Image (tube, grey):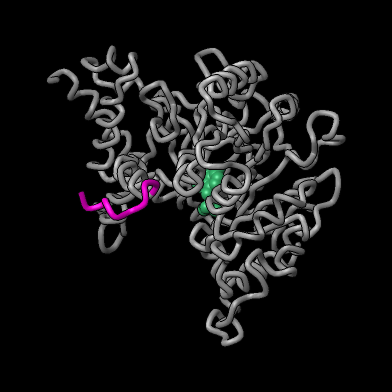
Amino acid sequence: MAWQNLSVRAQENCRGGGSNVMIQGMARVSSDKFDLQTNPKGIINLGVAENQLMSKELAAILRPVNAVDPKLFGYSEGPSGSKLLRKHFADNIFNQYFEPHEPVYEDHIVFTAGCSATVDNFTFCVCDPGDGILITTPFYGGFNTDIMAKSKARVIVAHLEDGVSPFGVDQVELMQQAVDQATAEGTRVRAFVLSNPHNPLGRNYPREVLIEFLKFASRNKLHILFDEIYALSVFDYALSGEAKQEQPDQTPFISVLSIPNIEDYCEKELVHVAYGMSKDFCLNGFRCGCLVSPWNKDILEAMNSIAVFTWMSSPIEAMIIKLVENPATIDWFVKTNQRRLAESYTLTVDILRAHRIPFLPAQGGHYIWIDLRQYIPSALVNMAAAGEREAEYMLWKAMLDKGVYLNLGVAFSEKKVGFFRLSFSVPPWLLRIGLERMLRACERTFTLSASL
Ligand SMILES: Cc1ncc(COP(=O)(O)O)c(C=O)c1O
């Protein structure tokens, strides 16, 4: 076996890596990328949460920065981000948009090369190998890697059964059961991680649920990490017509930092926020994330002690400072982005509605959760109902063959078969072609069912 001279943990990763469907899908997309001129039959990526709606404007804002200035050839000020970068984030992002009950200061922030690295380093600091981190379904699949690959912690999944809303307080009972069961089996559960706004569901948690989560963390002495990486991509206020009317509620985004007297619900030192530039600032490739932990000096110190491994590069730091140094630039950027997200979202739901494809209306994020169960070939309906995923893979492969990539439910640990996450944050002309390809693939798979 070729891996025999690797560590046990590396061998585990090698064994698991190839089976990750997201990685397989991405490999196919990157080997055959759509390009209108050079590869019009290539694959359109509606699977990854990357926002291309502000690319031109970003390029104009960042172009004046000389990325090959010899001043940027050396190490930057420090591995956790320079004081200036941290101050701009505190003043111009967190204190401006997250409405913190107590101001965020630069000393509360530790930077890493991306939010994935933030979650990985956070896990390393709160878990020993084998410890557990609780997550409810469906959830952003990247958390699996962030939590398990390096720190070797375990993801403890609380499956939300039918009838239990991911945005209601009832789920807390299932969370408690998952923690109790893990504990009875010998796993020490150390933290609860969630994304708000929710990925993949694209909705905000109501205040009462956030408070129940805090109480739950306190009862179980768990750290609670709020991944708020989509905080400024909430666009529902900019919707109109049917897209507005079909919203089930108007719950605003509430950062946990904004909850007054948080100590009434949870020990403050257990509460942390993860953030980054990939989503709200459309800079996935820049690799910039951070942990905000206003009340826990120990975790900041622990994160700082390993920050050297996730140090952002100097040119990237210089460009990010350029983007966030001016509150007026951020304000314009955020509002324009939200308006464009609302437009792309509207285009998407208009087409889904016209084809009677059920979806969960989204308030924020770059994606929408859609239900393609009606396209499951009839021969596979019973198997799909029993949780057999073949029908989902079939649909997914049919889409790839037609030239469009969506992310499938299994990648988010969704138990029900036939749900997909569709990212709409691509230019409208491209979105239209992608959606047409998706529809053709679904219809073709469905018609094929007769011959199965
Ligand atoms: C909820 C959530 N957290 C973290 C990340 C990873 O962010 P980054 O690109 O900064 O590593 C993503 C990316 O999809 C995400 O959706």
On the picture, is 442 further left or further right than 207? left
Whether residue 347 is visible here, answered yes or no, is no
Task: Give the percent coordinates (x, y) of residue 19.
Answer: 30, 40
Question: Does residue 79 sit above or below 268 in this rendering?
Answer: below
Q: Residue at x 39, y 38 (%)?
A: 407
Which one is in front, 105 or 394?
Answer: 105
Question: Does residue 396 sit above or below 335 in this rendering?
Answer: above
Whether residue 200 is visible here, answered yes or no, is yes
Q: Residue at x 60, y 36 (%)?
A: 193
Q: Residue at x 64, y 50 (%)?
A: 275
On the picture, is 359 further left or further right than 448? right
Image quarter (top left, top right, bottom left or bottom right) of the C terminus: top left
Q: What are the residue bounds of the magenta stretch?
A: 1-9
Which one is in front, 356 or 58?
Answer: 58
On the picture, is 28 further left or further right than 152? left
Residue 345 in the magenta stretch? The answer is no
- Image quarter for residue 223? top right
Residue farthest to the left, as pictured: 451
